[in-house]
Amino acid sequence: MKNEYAVLLDQLTSIRKIRIKILNEINANLADMNSRDFHVFYQICKVVKEPTMSDLSESTGLSNALITSSVDSLERLNLVKRKRGPDRRSYVVRLTSKGVERCQEMEKARNRSINKIFSSMTKDDLDELKGTLMRLNDLIEKYA
């Protein structure tokens, strides 16, 4: 018999699959970007302040060299601009007006995809799922 905790972890994989499905649907509309550039661009869109190259490396888990390559590609697409950071050794990445528009398109695609996935659930089902995930996050914070 399978360990009941292992079964729970298998079920959590479904959440990861949903996230990947959503990101893949968004990425499908961005034919001019490879998946790594999309991942970096998505992180730039999500932040409130202009990220440094190191911030992007940390948030994506990619090396500084890969971040540099992706930002180079995004600059060629006129989606971002690099500028000197607060100290002379770092750079921050700023969205261009075209980049802001693309982020807004991505957000709309993300919302369409999310709605498509969850629209068949009842309000009670959604409330139960939300409560369960919040409790899970609390447990992970407490014991991790």
Image (tube, rainbow, N blue to C red):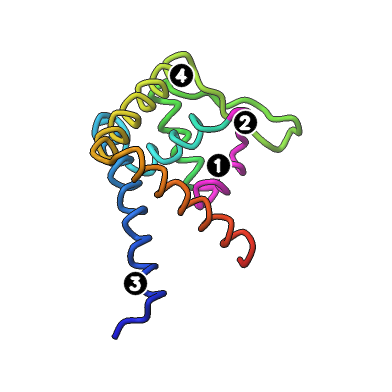
SS of the residue under disc 2: strand
Residue 92: which numbered mark, if any? Answer: 2
- Which of labels 3 and 2 is toward the front? 3
- The answer to whether 56 is drawn above or below residue 111 in the figure is below
Marks 4 and 1 sit apart, C-alpha to C-alpha, by 17 Å
Q: Give the image location of residue 90, x and y in percent.
A: 68, 36
Closest to the observer: 2 or 80?
2
| Crowd around label 2: few <14 · some 14–19 · many ≥20 (10 Å) | some
First of labels 3, 2 by sequence position: 3
For discs 2 and 4, the disc positioned in front in the rendered view: 4
In the rendered image, the residue lying farthest to the top is: 97
Residue 123 position, x and y percent, is 35, 38
Q: Quadrant of residue 16?
A: bottom left
- Kindly identify the amino acid type of the residue bearing the numbered disc 1: Leu
Residue at image x 53%, y 55%? 135
- Marks 2 and 4, the one that precedes in the sequence: 2
Residue found farthest to the front: 124
Q: Are marks 3 and 1 in contact (CB under 8 Å)?
A: no
78 or 95, which is in the foreground?
95
Q: Position of residue 130 (x, y in %)?
A: 44, 46
Q: Secondary structure at mark 1?
A: helix
Q: What range is drawn magenta here?
A: 48-65
Q: Which residue is mark 3?
A: 7
Question: Sequence order check: which comes first, mark 4 or mark 1?
Answer: 1
Q: Which quadrant does the N terminus fall into?
A: bottom left
